[in-house]
Image: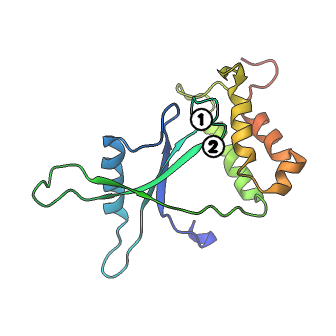
Amino acid sequence: MSQSCLQLVGWYHSHPHCQPDPSLKDIDCQMSYQLKMKGSGTTYHPCLGFIVSAFDIRPSKNDAVFQAFWAMPPPEQYPDGYGIPMKMKYSVYQNTSLSEELLAEIKKMTDFYRDAPDRVIFLEKWINNKPFIEKLKSSLSTKLPSDQIERGTFLDYVQELLLPKKGTI
């Protein structure tokens, strides 16, 4: 990250089948990350939490739903209490294209999680007989740079990474 002049500003996780509201565990994790990343002295490093609800079961929702939040520490009179999740507004700016470095990282990530016990089986049906892979592709298509949607190469690349190779289970 430092070689690319980037700085860590947060973390994300998913709520695959429910809305992206922070749970008590999410709030605890967010408080912990905020404390670890706060910086020292006069420097401040923000820490944002993002929750992604990728497979909202409402048929009208093809896109993944995102929520950004941070946690306000518990009041002084309740030091062992939970932090209070604070919803944040954010803007999305699309890159003009996806870099080869990003494509390589996506491949590494899919290879790493390929055999995870809680992975999504992308050929299984999601809702209305629509396979998970089609749900994912329709969600990604609204977030990709337009030049990569028109050619379809990125969505084809994602499908190739996620579906089992012919002759394998």
Q: Which residue lies furthest to the right in this view?
A: 151
State the residue at coordinates (15%, 50%). Answer: 80
Residue 85 in the figure: left or right of residue 116: left
Q: Disc 2 designates what residue?
A: 109
State the residue at coordinates (35%, 72%). Answer: 39
Please provide percent x and percent y for residue 82: 23, 49
State the quadrant of the N terminus. Answer: bottom right
Three-letter code for the amino acid on which mark 1 is drawn: Tyr
Q: Quadrant of residue 45?
A: bottom left
Q: Foreground: 124 or 116?
A: 124
Mark 2, other Cα within 10 Å: few <14 / some 14–19 / many ≥20: few
Residue 56 in the figure: left or right of residue 79: right
Question: Looking at the picture, does residue 148 appear above or below residue 89?
Answer: above
Question: Looking at the picture, does residue 94 appear above or below residue 134?
Answer: below
State the residue at coordinates (67%, 20%). Answer: 125
Please provide percent x and percent y for residue 51: 48, 46
Q: In which quarter of the image is residue 53?
A: top right
Mark 1, other Cα within 10 Å: few <14 / some 14–19 / many ≥20: few
Q: Disc 1 designates what residue?
A: 113
Please provide percent x and percent y for residue 28: 30, 48
Q: Residue furthest bottom?
A: 42
State the quadrant of the C terminus. Answer: top right
Q: Do the residues labelled 1 and 2 touch (CB within 8 Å)?
A: yes
Q: Quadrant of residue 33?
A: bottom left
